[in-house]
Each structure stands twice: as structure tokens, then as C-alpha cells.
Amino acid sequence: MTDPLALETSGLTKVYGHGHTEVVALRDASMRVRRGEVVALLGPSGAGKSTFLLCVGLINPPTRGTVTIGGQLMQDGPRSLGDLRRFRREHIGFVFQKSNLIPFLSAIENVQVVGELIGRPTSVARRRAKELLDALGVGKRAFNMPTQLSGGEQQRVTVARALANQPSLILADEPTAALDSVRGRQVMELFRDVAHRHGTCVIVVTHDHRALDVFDTIYEMEDGLLKPAASPVAEATVAHA
Amino acid sequence: MNLAVRDIRHSLGRFVLTTLGVGMLLMVVMGMGGIYRGLVDDALVVTRGVGADLWVVQRDTRGPFAEVSRLPRSLVDRVAAVPGVTDAREFVFHTIQREHRGKPLRMGVLGLGWPTDKGEGLPLIAGRPLAQNHFEMIADESLGLGLGERLRLGKDTYTVVGLTRWLVASGGDGIACFTSRDAQAIQFDEPGESIRLEREARRARADEIDFGRTQPGVLDRASGPAQNLAALPGPAISAVIARLMPGTDATKVQRSMSGWSDVTTYTGPQQEGLLLKGSVDRARRQILLFRVLLTIISAVIMALIIYTLTLDKLHPIALLKLIGAPTHVIVGLILQQSLIMGLLAYGVGYLIGTRLFPLFPRRVLVTNDDLLRLAGIVLVISVLASLLGIWKAMRVAPNEAIG
């Protein structure tokens, strides 16, 4: 993953249904994001932001278009689900609106499991998980179950989990929706710190306009169309259908 | 990190209760197997105990365990004279029911061939073998009789001189051993009034014919004891059991007796086969069917529970897929839970069963072979039970974790 471009999407189109039930959720969305760049994706509900994340996150294959992550063409033609899953666990971190922790694992185990899935020895994965939780200020709650954590704590554990595999790409879908403004801003700043320190590309779908100054690039999305908003480092090309 | 164990820890109460339930079911499966084994073992305990190489029974009957077999006592001498036979004894066996201490007492009466057989070969747990040819008995402990206890049977009173364990008839009744003479006396005991009436009837029959009227002495004899009448047979025995000389081919001896038109002979294994195919067979098949049904029910319950547990964690499974967990991790999560449940349930079933089975009124004989076989079956049903859950888990899409 030495390509300076962390992510490149080209002509990304997602169509659900067909005939008179056809819904175009994403129209020729193209984006280029460098390593270490923090990108915000704004737009009203139903604009296609989550669909874009699912396509980029190799969860939902696009109808047309390509996704290249770290120089590897991932979504173009047949790739086995196993390949995509392997790539996800090694290179992508996810943070979602709801905390999405595994309910039967403690906070530290929720983070540790990612390390173990990429083949780290248990002790190494556990140490790394503890470091991340400490760094995010929830180290003292490491052995609590998710139901024993507040919403903010849960979200920080989710962020720690997203960082556990040292990803080249973090996809976050409204990660601060469940947090107060202070906590929300802390999370956004955390993404920026991680991105800048480790060269990780972070794409955040957000409605929170109070923390937009944290982002390097801002995109807007409406009716499946992706377009850049004013941003000092935007290098996006937006193709309209 | 073992996800299966973590999930079990999370829903421990439900898992424990389910495992207990399945364990109880498996205990019943185990118990049914044990009852079946006990039934077979009980059925064979007498035939094996007497150690007969050859059973000589009434012609065209299947022996004393299957139906009534009546043979004259003199047959013992005839069998003893056959080349290859080293020892022939009378065998008397029948079931009686009497009142004892105000409760019904049902027992199998086994006649021992005194003086050759005094009961030394019986599984004695207390007391001694028979020491005299009358009025002593060896009783199985299941009859509830104590050493030295006296029991009136017919016109005589018998003293319990020895106690056995697990010496029961195929019907589960405890067996009491007497000398064959005493066993016959018990079997053919008749009330005094009945004897008097029979003697009067004999006298009346003799009186109706010329021979009786012209020979008054005959009338006197006819109304006397039956054993003094040569025309009447003595008490019948159930079978004659023969031991053969070492190295003697039993079928050869059988062939030499095949010309006797009043008897049928069976080797020891043949008699056991008849016993199992006869009185025990239907019960055996019924129990087997019940076991199969219970095993299927256990499998279905396990499958449903594992499926329900899987349904409860579809979201975590979707999440695991989202963060890239390989298929084997998810399959392992469900399969391991099923196996853990199956094996723990098996252990629970075993532990409860071993404490409960001795309290059953009939013997529950759980053999190591049966335990191993059941463990194998539990392993298989655990795997089968997980298939439905695995199928469901495989259909979960990772994006379901986001919705």
C-alpha cells in the first residue's frame, strides 16, 4: 500500500431493483482521496451516502464503476466474498452511527477480536486493544460489557475496534450521532489525529456541521450525486450522470 | 479467543437450563438403553447361571422360559445315559404369588438339583448355599426377605439361608431357589379339601367300572395318596439340563436324542436365543423404538435451541462478517456451541443417571459400550443440530449489521 492515493472510486453507480421499481442510489460517483486525508460526506437522508460507504467498504458491490484501495482494484469484476472479507479485515475499519459492539464480548475483547482475526497472537492483540482503549480514554472500562458502557464509551470502543487492524481506510457513518457535541468533536479530532499520524484515509458521513473544520475535504451528496464542497485540499472529480 | 464460550458466558442462564433439559433427555435415552440391557441380562441370568450345555424340554415346546414344559423325572436318568453327557439334572422353574406381611409377594421358584447343585454357583451376597434337601431357600434381595426369615409356602415353612443380588426372572420378579423337590412341592401344592375331593372323585370313578366294584382293594387304593398309584405320574419337572464332557460336540449329542419322540433339545445358546426372541423380544423392540424416538427428539430440541441462539446473534454475526471474520470463525462459533451443549448435556445425563438408576425398581444396566455409542450419537446430533443455525448464519449479509 505505497500508492499515495488511498482510495479512488470511478463512475460508481448503484441501482436497486429494476424496471419500474428501479432506484438509482448512486450515480457515477468518483472520488480520489490521499493517504492521511480526512473526508466529510454531507447530505440529506436518502442521498446515497451510506450506499457509497457500503460500496467503498466492499460490502455492497456497485452496479457499475470501480473501487481502488491502496492501488488495488477491488470492485471490478468477480472477486470472491472471501477475498473481499479478507481485504476488509486487513485494511478497512468501520464505525457506525450505532455503536455496533458485539454484545457478548467485553470492551477489550471487542477490540482484541479484530487483531486475532488478522492473525495476531492473542497476547499481542490484547495488548494492542488495551493501548487503543487507553488512548481513547476508556481503558478503565476495558472489562465491562457493552451494556455497562455509556453511548459515548461504546462509540469510543467502536473507534478503537476500527483502529485495531491499523487500517488504510476508515469508513464512519454518522459516528457522532449518539454523542454530545463535546464527545462528538473529540471523536472527529481523533479521526483527524489518526489519519495524520498513521496516513490513514478517513471518510466520515456526518450531519454535524459544528465539526467540519476538522476535515481536509468535504463532499456533498444529493440524489446519488457526489460533488465537492468548498475545501482547501479537495482533489475530487465528480462525474454527473 | 473462543467466541462460542464468550457467547455462552453471556447467555449463561438459558444455556445452562437448556443443557440441563437436553441432559435429562439424554439421561432417559441412557436409561432406556440400560433398561434394555437389564432386561436382557435378567432374562439370561438363570440360563447362564445353571451353566447347561444342553436343555431337554417337552417335545415341540420352547422350554420353561417361554411356555409350560412338563417332563417326567425319569428323563434325568435317560439323559444321563447318553454318551457325551457327564451330568444331567432336573430343572424346575415357575412363578408364584403369595401374601407376605400383608403384601403380594411374587417370585420365580427355581429348583436346584440337590445334592449335585446346592446353589454354590449363585451370586450370594449374604448367608450360605443350601445345606439340607428340604425347607431351606436362597432368596434374591429384591424379594425383601431377610436372612433367617421364615416363609410359609404351601404346607411347609422355608427358612432363608442365603441372599443373592440381581437374580431375577425375565419378568423382573426376584428368584428364590429351593431343592427341586421343594420347588415341586410348592408348585403342585393343593389345599387339603382339594385333595380330599380328588380322592373321592377317583373312588367314584373306580366305583363306576366293573374292576372297581369287583376288586374292593382297588377302591381303597384309588382313594389313597396319589404317589401310591402307579397309574398316576409323579410331579413333572420343567426340563432336564445336561452338562457335556469337555470337547464333546453338542450337536452330536442333540442328534442322538433327536430320535426321542417326547423331547426337544436345545444347546445353551439356542435356549438363550429362544428366550430373547420370545418373551423379551417385544419389550426389547419397544424400548429400542422409544430410544430412537427420544434420540430424535433430543436432536430436534438441540437443533431448535441452537437455531434460536443463532437467531439471537444474527446481528453480531453480521458484524463479524462486516469486520471480515472468515466463514470458519462463524461456523465454529455455532458448531462449538452445539458441541459444548451436547457434551455437557451428556455429562449431566450421565451424572444424574448414575445416581438415579439404582433407585429404579428394575435393573438399569448401563454398559461402557452403550455409553461410548451414545457419546458418538450425541456428537453426531450436535453437529446435525448446528446445521440449521449455520445455514441461517451463512445467509446473513454483513450490511445487516448497519441497518
Image (cartoon, coloured by chain):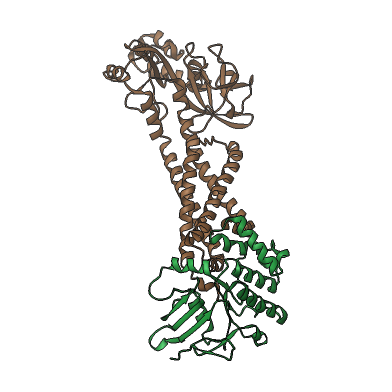
Chain colours: A green, B brown
Look at the image and tell me whether residue A25 can be seen.
no
Q: Is residue B275 left or right of residue A222?
A: left
Residue in the image at 64% along x and 63% along y: A129
In the image, residue B186 lies at what x, y percent? 51, 21
Q: Is residue B367 above or below residue B382?
A: above
Residue in the image at 55% along x and 51% along y: B340
Q: Quadrant of residue B237?
A: top left
In the image, residue B370 lies at what x, y percent? 48, 39
Q: Is residue B261 left or right of residue A92?
A: left
In the image, residue A162 lies at what x, y percent? 59, 70
Look at the image and tell me whether residue B30 can be seen.
yes
Q: Is residue A158 above or below residue B344?
A: below
Residue in the image at 66% along x and 66% along y: A132
Camera-nearest residue between A168 and B192: A168
Q: Is residue A35 above or below residue B51?
A: below
Camera-nearest residue between B391 and A121: A121
In the image, residue B367 lies at what x, y percent? 50, 35
Q: Is residue A23 left or right of residue A124?
A: left
Q: Look at the image and tell me in which quarter the N terminus of chain B lies.
A: bottom right
